[in-house]
Amino acid sequence: MQLIENRAVSVSIITLATIAVFYVLVVGKAFLVPLAVAVMLWYVINALSRNYVRVIPWVKEKNWLTTTLSILSIGLFILFAVDMVQGNIEDVRSKVPEYSENFRELTNKMVERFNLTRVPNVTEMASGIKISPIVSSLVSSVGGIIGNVSLVLFYVLFMLLEQGTFTKKIKAIFPDQDRRRSIMSILSHAQEDIQTYLWIKTLTSSLTGIASYIVLLMVGVDFAGFWAFTIFLLNFIPTIGSIIATLFPAVLALIQFDTLFPFALVLIGVGAIQLLVGNVLEPKLMGNSLNVSPFVVMMSLTLWGSIWGIAGMFLSVPITVMLLIVFAHFERTRYIAILLSGDGSLKFTEDLPQLAPPEKSD
Protein backbone atom coordinates (compact mmCIF):
# COMPACT_ATOMS: atom_id res chain seq x y z
CA MET A 1 0.00 0.00 0.00
CA GLN A 2 2.85 2.34 0.93
CA LEU A 3 4.57 1.57 -2.40
CA ILE A 4 1.42 2.45 -4.33
CA GLU A 5 1.08 5.72 -2.43
CA ASN A 6 4.73 6.62 -3.07
CA ARG A 7 4.34 5.94 -6.79
CA ALA A 8 1.13 7.99 -6.90
CA VAL A 9 2.94 10.90 -5.23
CA SER A 10 5.87 10.57 -7.69
CA VAL A 11 3.54 10.54 -10.69
CA SER A 12 1.66 13.56 -9.33
CA ILE A 13 4.89 15.49 -8.78
CA ILE A 14 6.16 14.66 -12.27
CA THR A 15 2.81 15.66 -13.81
CA LEU A 16 2.72 18.98 -11.93
CA ALA A 17 6.36 19.67 -12.81
CA THR A 18 5.67 18.98 -16.51
CA ILE A 19 2.66 21.31 -16.49
CA ALA A 20 4.72 23.99 -14.76
CA VAL A 21 7.56 23.67 -17.29
CA PHE A 22 5.20 23.98 -20.27
CA TYR A 23 3.45 26.93 -18.62
CA VAL A 24 6.79 28.72 -18.20
CA LEU A 25 7.77 27.91 -21.81
CA VAL A 26 4.53 29.39 -23.15
CA VAL A 27 4.30 32.42 -20.84
CA GLY A 28 8.01 33.21 -21.10
CA LYS A 29 8.14 32.88 -24.89
CA ALA A 30 9.15 36.52 -25.46
CA PHE A 31 12.19 36.06 -23.21
CA LEU A 32 13.10 32.41 -23.82
CA VAL A 33 13.01 32.35 -27.65
CA PRO A 34 15.66 35.08 -28.14
CA LEU A 35 17.72 33.46 -25.37
CA ALA A 36 17.57 30.03 -27.05
CA VAL A 37 18.51 31.56 -30.42
CA ALA A 38 21.38 33.37 -28.70
CA VAL A 39 22.69 30.10 -27.27
CA MET A 40 22.65 28.53 -30.75
CA LEU A 41 24.43 31.57 -32.17
CA TRP A 42 26.99 31.35 -29.36
CA TYR A 43 27.64 27.73 -30.35
CA VAL A 44 28.16 28.79 -33.97
CA ILE A 45 30.57 31.58 -33.01
CA ASN A 46 32.69 29.20 -30.95
CA ALA A 47 32.66 26.62 -33.73
CA LEU A 48 33.75 29.27 -36.25
CA SER A 49 36.47 30.37 -33.87
CA ARG A 50 37.88 26.84 -33.67
CA ASN A 51 37.82 26.58 -37.46
CA TYR A 52 39.71 29.87 -37.81
CA VAL A 53 42.39 28.32 -35.60
CA ARG A 54 42.85 25.62 -38.24
CA VAL A 55 42.90 28.13 -41.10
CA ILE A 56 45.25 30.76 -39.64
CA PRO A 57 48.73 29.15 -39.42
CA TRP A 58 50.21 31.39 -36.68
CA VAL A 59 47.26 30.90 -34.29
CA LYS A 60 47.52 27.79 -32.12
CA GLU A 61 44.38 28.06 -30.03
CA LYS A 62 41.11 29.96 -29.80
CA ASN A 63 41.68 33.57 -28.74
CA TRP A 64 40.31 37.09 -29.13
CA LEU A 65 41.36 37.25 -32.79
CA THR A 66 39.47 34.11 -33.84
CA THR A 67 36.45 35.15 -31.76
CA THR A 68 36.46 38.60 -33.37
CA LEU A 69 36.67 37.09 -36.86
CA SER A 70 33.77 34.77 -36.00
CA ILE A 71 31.63 37.65 -34.75
CA LEU A 72 32.41 39.66 -37.88
CA SER A 73 31.49 36.69 -40.08
CA ILE A 74 28.15 36.23 -38.29
CA GLY A 75 27.54 39.98 -38.37
CA LEU A 76 28.13 40.16 -42.12
CA PHE A 77 25.72 37.28 -42.66
CA ILE A 78 23.05 38.96 -40.52
CA LEU A 79 23.53 42.26 -42.37
CA PHE A 80 23.20 40.40 -45.67
CA ALA A 81 20.02 38.68 -44.48
CA VAL A 82 18.46 41.92 -43.21
CA ASP A 83 19.38 43.76 -46.40
CA MET A 84 18.05 40.89 -48.52
CA VAL A 85 14.68 40.90 -46.75
CA GLN A 86 14.25 44.65 -46.46
CA GLY A 87 15.35 45.18 -50.05
CA ASN A 88 12.63 42.85 -51.30
CA ILE A 89 9.73 43.74 -48.99
CA GLU A 90 8.62 46.79 -50.94
CA ASP A 91 9.17 45.04 -54.28
CA VAL A 92 7.03 42.12 -53.15
CA ARG A 93 4.29 44.43 -51.93
CA SER A 94 4.34 46.37 -55.21
CA LYS A 95 3.80 43.13 -57.11
CA VAL A 96 0.80 42.07 -55.00
CA PRO A 97 -1.86 43.71 -57.25
CA GLU A 98 -0.35 42.06 -60.33
CA TYR A 99 -0.22 38.68 -58.60
CA SER A 100 -3.80 39.06 -57.40
CA GLU A 101 -5.00 39.82 -60.91
CA ASN A 102 -3.08 36.84 -62.34
CA PHE A 103 -4.55 34.62 -59.66
CA ARG A 104 -8.09 35.70 -60.50
CA GLU A 105 -7.48 35.04 -64.20
CA LEU A 106 -6.03 31.65 -63.41
CA THR A 107 -8.99 30.62 -61.26
CA ASN A 108 -11.39 31.78 -63.97
CA LYS A 109 -9.53 29.67 -66.53
CA MET A 110 -9.64 26.64 -64.25
CA VAL A 111 -13.35 27.11 -63.64
CA GLU A 112 -14.05 27.36 -67.38
CA ARG A 113 -11.73 24.51 -68.39
CA PHE A 114 -13.29 22.03 -65.98
CA ASN A 115 -16.79 23.37 -66.55
CA LEU A 116 -17.23 24.20 -62.88
CA THR A 117 -19.57 27.12 -63.43
CA ARG A 118 -22.50 24.78 -62.90
CA VAL A 119 -21.39 24.14 -59.35
CA PRO A 120 -22.88 26.81 -57.05
CA ASN A 121 -20.54 29.45 -55.62
CA VAL A 122 -17.31 28.02 -57.12
CA THR A 123 -16.46 31.31 -58.81
CA GLU A 124 -17.28 33.22 -55.63
CA MET A 125 -15.10 30.87 -53.58
CA ALA A 126 -12.19 31.29 -55.99
CA SER A 127 -12.50 35.05 -56.10
CA GLY A 128 -12.71 35.13 -52.32
CA ILE A 129 -9.14 33.87 -51.95
CA LYS A 130 -7.04 36.95 -51.32
CA ILE A 131 -3.32 37.03 -52.07
CA SER A 132 -2.58 40.36 -50.38
CA PRO A 133 -3.17 39.20 -46.77
CA ILE A 134 -1.00 36.12 -47.34
CA VAL A 135 1.94 38.13 -48.66
CA SER A 136 1.53 40.81 -45.98
CA SER A 137 1.45 38.16 -43.25
CA LEU A 138 4.62 36.55 -44.59
CA VAL A 139 6.38 39.91 -44.75
CA SER A 140 5.26 40.81 -41.20
CA SER A 141 6.54 37.48 -39.85
CA VAL A 142 9.95 38.00 -41.41
CA GLY A 143 10.04 41.56 -40.10
CA GLY A 144 9.22 40.35 -36.59
CA ILE A 145 12.11 37.90 -36.66
CA ILE A 146 14.47 40.66 -37.75
CA GLY A 147 13.20 42.84 -34.91
CA ASN A 148 14.58 40.39 -32.34
CA VAL A 149 18.09 40.39 -33.82
CA SER A 150 19.33 43.21 -31.56
CA LEU A 151 18.12 41.42 -28.41
CA VAL A 152 19.74 38.15 -29.53
CA LEU A 153 23.05 39.90 -30.23
CA PHE A 154 22.87 41.54 -26.79
CA TYR A 155 22.55 38.11 -25.14
CA VAL A 156 25.37 36.66 -27.25
CA LEU A 157 27.71 39.50 -26.27
CA PHE A 158 27.30 38.79 -22.58
CA MET A 159 27.70 35.04 -23.13
CA LEU A 160 31.02 35.67 -24.87
CA LEU A 161 32.16 37.91 -22.01
CA GLU A 162 31.17 35.28 -19.41
CA GLN A 163 32.52 32.15 -21.13
CA GLY A 164 36.06 32.70 -19.82
CA THR A 165 34.90 32.07 -16.23
CA PHE A 166 32.57 29.19 -17.09
CA THR A 167 35.03 26.39 -16.23
CA LYS A 168 35.84 27.99 -12.87
CA LYS A 169 32.15 28.14 -12.01
CA ILE A 170 31.68 24.46 -12.87
CA LYS A 171 34.62 23.53 -10.63
CA ALA A 172 33.17 25.58 -7.77
CA ILE A 173 29.68 24.10 -8.16
CA PHE A 174 30.90 20.48 -8.54
CA PRO A 175 34.02 19.93 -6.39
CA ASP A 176 33.72 16.14 -6.83
CA GLN A 177 35.91 15.21 -9.81
CA ASP A 178 33.66 12.45 -11.20
CA ARG A 179 30.52 14.57 -11.08
CA ARG A 180 32.39 17.50 -12.60
CA ARG A 181 33.67 15.24 -15.37
CA SER A 182 30.13 14.09 -16.11
CA ILE A 183 28.87 17.66 -16.31
CA MET A 184 31.71 18.65 -18.64
CA SER A 185 30.95 15.56 -20.73
CA ILE A 186 27.32 16.63 -21.13
CA LEU A 187 28.34 20.13 -22.20
CA SER A 188 31.12 19.04 -24.56
CA HIS A 189 29.04 16.36 -26.30
CA ALA A 190 26.07 18.70 -26.61
CA GLN A 191 28.34 21.32 -28.15
CA GLU A 192 29.96 18.80 -30.49
CA ASP A 193 26.70 17.30 -31.77
CA ILE A 194 24.90 20.63 -32.13
CA GLN A 195 27.84 22.12 -34.00
CA THR A 196 27.97 19.08 -36.27
CA TYR A 197 24.27 19.44 -37.01
CA LEU A 198 24.53 23.18 -37.64
CA TRP A 199 27.56 22.90 -39.93
CA ILE A 200 26.15 20.09 -42.04
CA LYS A 201 22.72 21.71 -42.17
CA THR A 202 24.28 25.01 -43.22
CA LEU A 203 26.27 23.30 -45.96
CA THR A 204 23.34 21.31 -47.36
CA SER A 205 20.96 24.27 -47.07
CA SER A 206 23.46 26.45 -48.93
CA LEU A 207 23.77 23.90 -51.73
CA THR A 208 19.98 23.63 -51.90
CA GLY A 209 19.58 27.41 -52.01
CA ILE A 210 22.21 27.89 -54.73
CA ALA A 211 20.83 25.08 -56.92
CA SER A 212 17.26 26.37 -56.43
CA TYR A 213 18.40 29.89 -57.34
CA ILE A 214 19.72 28.57 -60.66
CA VAL A 215 16.40 26.83 -61.37
CA LEU A 216 14.34 29.91 -60.44
CA LEU A 217 16.59 32.17 -62.51
CA MET A 218 16.29 29.91 -65.55
CA VAL A 219 12.49 29.85 -65.27
CA GLY A 220 12.39 33.61 -64.74
CA VAL A 221 10.66 33.68 -61.34
CA ASP A 222 10.55 37.10 -59.69
CA PHE A 223 12.86 37.69 -56.70
CA ALA A 224 14.88 34.51 -57.36
CA GLY A 225 17.58 35.58 -54.89
CA PHE A 226 15.06 36.28 -52.15
CA TRP A 227 13.32 32.93 -52.63
CA ALA A 228 16.66 31.09 -52.74
CA PHE A 229 17.58 32.69 -49.40
CA THR A 230 14.15 31.74 -48.03
CA ILE A 231 14.74 28.15 -49.18
CA PHE A 232 18.11 28.20 -47.40
CA LEU A 233 16.46 29.26 -44.12
CA LEU A 234 13.46 26.93 -44.37
CA ASN A 235 15.72 23.91 -44.83
CA PHE A 236 16.75 24.26 -41.18
CA ILE A 237 13.19 23.14 -40.31
CA PRO A 238 13.11 19.33 -40.62
CA THR A 239 10.86 17.83 -43.32
CA ILE A 240 8.12 20.49 -43.24
CA GLY A 241 10.60 23.23 -44.10
CA SER A 242 11.67 21.41 -47.26
CA ILE A 243 8.06 20.97 -48.35
CA ILE A 244 7.23 24.64 -47.77
CA ALA A 245 10.48 25.70 -49.46
CA THR A 246 9.39 23.78 -52.56
CA LEU A 247 5.77 24.96 -52.62
CA PHE A 248 6.36 28.69 -52.03
CA PRO A 249 8.34 29.47 -55.21
CA ALA A 250 6.22 27.03 -57.23
CA VAL A 251 3.01 28.81 -56.22
CA LEU A 252 4.64 32.16 -56.97
CA ALA A 253 5.55 30.90 -60.46
CA LEU A 254 1.94 29.81 -60.95
CA ILE A 255 0.61 33.23 -59.94
CA GLN A 256 3.28 35.16 -61.82
CA PHE A 257 3.04 33.43 -65.20
CA ASP A 258 -0.63 32.48 -65.15
CA THR A 259 0.26 29.11 -66.75
CA LEU A 260 1.02 25.64 -65.44
CA PHE A 261 4.31 25.01 -67.27
CA PRO A 262 6.58 27.32 -65.18
CA PHE A 263 4.82 26.03 -62.06
CA ALA A 264 5.63 22.44 -63.05
CA LEU A 265 9.25 23.31 -63.86
CA VAL A 266 9.82 24.97 -60.48
CA LEU A 267 7.96 22.25 -58.56
CA ILE A 268 9.89 19.42 -60.25
CA GLY A 269 13.26 21.21 -60.29
CA VAL A 270 13.28 22.49 -56.70
CA GLY A 271 11.60 19.29 -55.47
CA ALA A 272 14.29 17.14 -57.11
CA ILE A 273 17.02 19.23 -55.48
CA GLN A 274 15.35 18.86 -52.08
CA LEU A 275 15.10 15.08 -52.50
CA LEU A 276 18.70 14.65 -53.64
CA VAL A 277 20.22 16.84 -50.96
CA GLY A 278 17.86 15.84 -48.14
CA ASN A 279 17.67 12.09 -48.78
CA VAL A 280 21.08 11.34 -50.31
CA LEU A 281 23.75 13.92 -49.44
CA GLU A 282 22.65 14.96 -45.95
CA PRO A 283 22.29 11.42 -44.50
CA LYS A 284 25.79 10.56 -45.80
CA LEU A 285 27.28 13.65 -44.16
CA MET A 286 25.35 13.24 -40.92
CA GLY A 287 25.96 9.49 -40.62
CA ASN A 288 25.26 8.43 -37.03
CA SER A 289 26.59 11.64 -35.50
CA LEU A 290 23.24 12.69 -34.03
CA ASN A 291 21.53 9.30 -33.76
CA VAL A 292 18.09 10.80 -33.12
CA SER A 293 14.97 8.91 -34.16
CA PRO A 294 13.25 10.50 -37.19
CA PHE A 295 9.89 10.00 -35.47
CA VAL A 296 11.21 11.85 -32.41
CA VAL A 297 12.40 14.66 -34.68
CA MET A 298 8.90 15.03 -36.13
CA MET A 299 7.31 14.91 -32.66
CA SER A 300 9.81 17.51 -31.43
CA LEU A 301 9.09 19.68 -34.46
CA THR A 302 5.36 19.58 -33.70
CA LEU A 303 5.84 20.18 -29.98
CA TRP A 304 8.26 23.10 -30.15
CA GLY A 305 6.46 24.57 -33.14
CA SER A 306 3.22 24.66 -31.17
CA ILE A 307 4.96 26.28 -28.18
CA TRP A 308 7.38 28.74 -29.82
CA GLY A 309 6.10 28.97 -33.40
CA ILE A 310 8.58 29.21 -36.27
CA ALA A 311 11.52 29.77 -33.92
CA GLY A 312 10.62 26.54 -32.11
CA MET A 313 10.70 24.65 -35.40
CA PHE A 314 14.22 25.91 -36.11
CA LEU A 315 15.38 24.98 -32.59
CA SER A 316 13.58 21.62 -32.32
CA VAL A 317 16.52 19.41 -33.38
CA PRO A 318 19.21 21.13 -31.24
CA ILE A 319 16.91 21.03 -28.21
CA THR A 320 16.18 17.33 -28.78
CA VAL A 321 19.89 16.56 -29.10
CA MET A 322 20.64 18.36 -25.83
CA LEU A 323 17.84 16.50 -24.02
CA LEU A 324 19.09 13.15 -25.34
CA ILE A 325 22.62 13.81 -24.08
CA VAL A 326 21.44 15.00 -20.66
CA PHE A 327 19.10 12.02 -20.19
CA ALA A 328 21.89 9.63 -21.22
CA HIS A 329 24.14 10.81 -18.38
CA PHE A 330 21.58 10.08 -15.67
CA GLU A 331 21.09 6.47 -14.69
CA ARG A 332 17.39 6.92 -13.95
CA THR A 333 16.62 8.69 -17.25
CA ARG A 334 18.90 6.75 -19.60
CA TYR A 335 15.95 4.72 -20.87
CA ILE A 336 14.41 7.98 -22.15
CA ALA A 337 17.62 8.71 -24.08
CA ILE A 338 17.46 5.21 -25.58
CA LEU A 339 13.87 5.85 -26.69
CA LEU A 340 14.90 9.17 -28.25
CA SER A 341 17.89 7.63 -30.08
CA GLY A 342 17.76 6.28 -33.59
CA ASP A 343 19.08 2.75 -32.95
CA GLY A 344 19.12 2.45 -29.15
CA SER A 345 22.88 2.98 -28.77
CA LEU A 346 24.36 5.78 -26.69
CA LYS A 347 27.84 6.17 -28.14
CA PHE A 348 29.19 8.86 -25.82
CA THR A 349 28.47 7.32 -22.38
CA GLU A 350 30.38 4.05 -22.60
CA ASP A 351 33.58 5.13 -20.83
CA LEU A 352 32.33 8.03 -18.75
CA PRO A 353 31.16 8.21 -15.13
CA GLN A 354 27.42 8.73 -14.97
CA LEU A 355 25.83 11.68 -13.23
CA ALA A 356 23.93 9.82 -10.54
CA PRO A 357 22.38 11.51 -7.51
CA PRO A 358 24.75 11.81 -4.55
CA GLU A 359 24.42 9.11 -1.92
CA LYS A 360 22.57 10.06 1.23
CA SER A 361 24.58 9.94 4.42
CA ASP A 362 23.22 7.99 7.35
Image: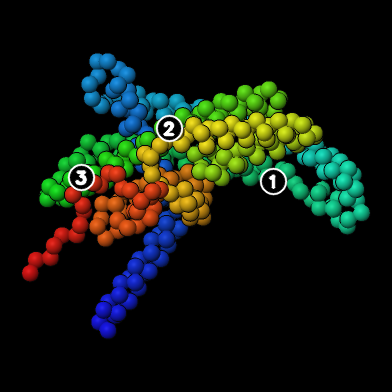
Query: Would you name the residue on which mark 3 appears?
Result: 351
**Farthest top residue in view:** 57
The residue pinned by badge 1 equals: 133
Rendered position, 34 above or below 225: below
- Can residue 58 be seen in the rendering of this structure? yes
Alpha-carbon span between mark 2 and mark 3: 26 Å
Q: Secondary structure at mark 1?
A: helix
Q: Name the residue nearer the viewer: 144 or 236.
A: 236
- Work out whether residue 70 or residue 354 is closer to the camera in this orientation and state it: 354
Tell me the amino acid under the disc marked 1. Answer: Pro
Cα gap from disc 2 to disc 1, whole angstroms: 40 Å
Label 2: element kind: helix
x, y percentage for residue 279? 52, 37
Q: Are marks 1 and 3 in contact (CB under 8 Å)?
A: no
Residue at the spot x=42%, y=61% of the render? Answer: 22
Q: Position of residue 123 (x, y in %)?
A: 86, 50
Report helix, strand or loop for mark 3. Answer: loop
For mark 2, what is the residue?
285
